[in-house]
Image (cartoon, helix red, strand yellow):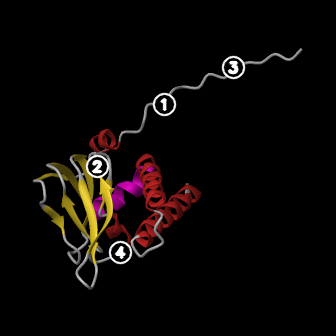
Amino acid sequence: MRRHTAIRRKRRQPFSVEVFLNSVGISRVETKYRKSQRIYSQGDPAINVMYIQQGAVKLSIISSAGKEAIVALLGPGDFFGEGCLTGLPFRTGTSTAIAPTTVLVIDKKEMTRVLHKEHGLADRFIAYLLQRWRRSRRPSHQSLPIIAIILFITIRSICIKCIR
């Protein structure tokens, strides 16, 4: 007669990006936006990544004909502006607060440094980007920065693990 043994797994606490950002001492600026206030515009320099603490943000693009297309609606716990991590010099879309919103603004160099150093955040960031990409299901140019970031972070993590 076979004896079945149950393996107890430790319950892992859900990963909190906000707690993590506070614990690693990442330099960032907390910025508040009013409803309908523009956070950045299409064509602005891409110099930072944002993390929504409270509120909601609309991401949109403006066509050459001047029509707005909403790309995503984001809320607390979401990142945006991550296209800067791929080397894009300019924003490919516009972000607007659709409610009173508090955002952590993280410099591109600082975010890159922390993603390379802190594998927990890098893993969570990759998972977040994949989830957002799957939700959008858009094979458009808007998806390319997300795919590039995922590949870059994954390859970089593999290389770092091989060196150690």
User: Comparing marks 2 and 1, which lies closer to the viewer?
Assistant: 2
Among numbered discs 2 and 4, the one appearing first in the sequence? 2
The amino acid type of the residue labelled 3 equals Ala
Among numbered discs 3 and 4, the one appearing first in the sequence? 3
Give the label on residue 6, or none. 3
Give the label on residue 75, or none. 2
Q: Position of residue 104 (x, y in %)?
A: 22, 51
Among numbered discs 1 and 4, the one appearing first in the sequence? 1
User: Residue visible at 43% across and 35% down?
Assistant: 14
User: Residue visible at 46% across and 68% down?
Assistant: 138
Q: Position of residue 9 (x, y in %)?
A: 59, 26
The answer to whether 94 is drawn above or below residue 23 in the figure is below
Among numbered discs 1 and 3, the one appearing first in the sequence? 3
Circles 1, 3 touching at the beta carbon (< 8 Å) = no
Dominant SS of magenta comes to helix
Q: Considering the image in quadrants, where does the C terminus appear?
A: bottom right
Q: Is label 1 in a helix, a strand or a loop?
A: loop
Residue extending furthest right?
Answer: 1
The amino acid type of the residue labelled 1 equals Arg
Give the label on residue 87, or none. 4
Circles 3, 4 touching at the beta carbon (< 8 Å) = no
Q: Which residue is mark 1?
A: 12
Q: Is label 2 in a helix, a strand or a loop?
A: loop
Bounds of the magenta segment = 108-119
